[in-house]
Image (cartoon, rainbow, N blue to C red):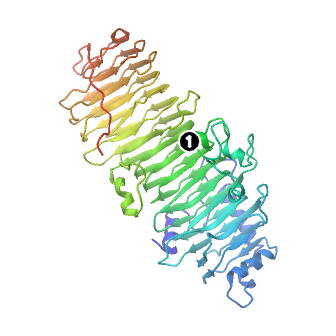
Amino acid sequence: MGTLAGVSAACAQSGNSAGDPPSTPSDWPNWAPEPAQSYRVIDRLSGEAVQLADFLGGGDDWAAAFDAAIGSGAKAIALPSGRPIRLHRQVAIANSIAILGAASGSDIDWRGSEHSAFRIEPPRQDPDLFVSNVVFDRIAISRPAGEAPDGFLIHAVNIRGLTVTRCKSVRMSLVHVEHMRQRMKLYDRRGGSIERDPAVLAGFAADHTDDLNEDISIIGCAVDYTAYQGAIIRFDFAKRVAVYRCTGRFAKVSWWGGGARAAEGGDIRHLRRVRDVYVAECEMSGANGGVYGNNGQNCVVARNRVRDMLDVGVDFEGCRDCIAYGNDVRNVGNFAYVTFYAAKNIVFRDNYAEQDGSASTLNLRYGTGKYGAMRGIYFAALRSSGFTRADGSVEVVFTRNRFIFSGKDRLGACVPSYFTSLEFTDNELINVCCDWRYRATKTILISGNRLLFDQPGNEAVTLMAASAVEGTMTDNRITVSTDLPAGSVAIGYDLTSRTGQCRIEGNRVDNRGHAPLPLTVQTGKASLAKAQITNNTVDAIGNDGVGQSLLRQSGNRGPNGRGLHMGQGAAMPRYPTKP
């Protein structure tokens, strides 16, 4: 790509042509106008629009023409088609206006040095003052070929009501939304503490969210940033944001609702200042992440396609009450689906992810630095740094997802961290292990998962494992059709709590390799811990010999149908240990 024509093609492939609005999905949020409604408003405004060309005054200063048209009090401005609009400087917008391209689209050739072509901002620096109801439709903007990508079509500060439809950008990002408290440098995420929210210190309300940006819709747009990395939209301190049917080559969707670290506003007692978000049916590639953000609440991420990201696919950082479903993530440097910091009531369901290891070198392809380890093998992950208190701040569900590692000589993996509650149920994993052992965790449920391994990997591995004060591992099916490295374990549980308990029941391991794959429970110094191991089908059962009398096993059988006795447990290897 790299041309407006190329971006137009991307729009067409996603059903985002300049004609009819995209259909409204069944999960469309009730707080956002449906696409058809937004398009009807645009059609009405088109009938009331003044012609931008009429304000040229015989010259060629299009920025001055915009200024005059906006200053005329018009509700809408119609841009010409068939002739490029060359802008040498930024256009300021301080009141309600619609900037409307022609039916076939209108092209802007951006030659300015500012951060954006259009800047929406109240007429004075007042954090309680907002601009309302600004519309952009069918605008195509590009920087000259040969110039490095930079800037945005739109930069909005304190906006309530921003609709951007059927717009395209090349070598530029599309939309950046900020709050005036940021612009006035009142907000410093490092200026607070666990008890003192930096956003409140900056003047945001402690008990409501009526002081945020709001009502933002980005529909049927496309970005070709041409190099790492740009944005479809970045929005800060905002609520009721819908991003639908957009494409981003070297571009992403991200948000900021405050710092997610515990001492930067992320403590679970503080408000989340990005709220009510809907990101659906978008395609993104070539950035650090697909859809991600800090301190969001009530966020829906649905049916997006994410490819070739340096870091993450879908990522909730310091978020609560969020869900991701129906997404397709392929080849990311670190984690396909992940939470960072607090993660209260987060659900990942019915998603797909595939890794082949190639993302480990994406930074070289993009000409930038690495993001973390970038192994290109991880799928579900928790990264709960700073949130190990028993306050319910990390409660996550992974259910009905399908994860496939299709690379060679390795296996895929999930990444544990602290959790108050973790449910990992009814997932299908192909050449992907799920070892959720982590110290001081509270409650875990691993149930109904199906694991298939047809390649051996490069080091010993524990295929499925957990550790928590209270754990349940039931009705999981593991099928191994190859020889795994020596020392591998099928199912493991680490009773790290002195009074912990676990139930391991009804699991089945079909091992067609030569080396046995045992079920192992480790109690260590947890002398009062209890384990109930019943009705499993596995090669062998063992423990580390400490607290033996507190392990209860019955009805367990080997692959030949014979009963099993408790034996000496094998060590449970961690994976991966090699680079």
Q: Nearer the viewer, residue 534 or 196?
A: 196
Residue 321 visible from this viewpoint: no
Residue drawn at point x = 78 percent, y = 73 percent:
48
Q: Residue at x 58, y 56 (%)?
A: 244
Residue at 21% from the left image edge and 26% from the top image edge: 516
Percent of width and height locating residue 285: 46, 59
Position of residue 260 in the picture relative to residue 355 (left or right): right
Q: Position of residue 371 (x, y in %)?
A: 43, 52
Q: Nearer the viewer, residue 112 or 12?
A: 112
Q: Secondary structure at mark 1?
A: strand
Q: Which residue ends up furthest to the right in the rendered image?
A: 73
Q: From what the image shows, is residue 208 above or below residue 73?
A: above
Q: Amino acid at mark 1?
A: Ile
Extreme residue in the bottom direction: 58
Q: Which residue is mark 1?
A: 323
Q: Nearer the viewer, residue 160 or 554?
A: 160
Q: Is residue 73 left or right of residue 363?
A: right
Place of residue 97 in the rendered image (x, y in percent of width and height, measured from the top left): 75, 68
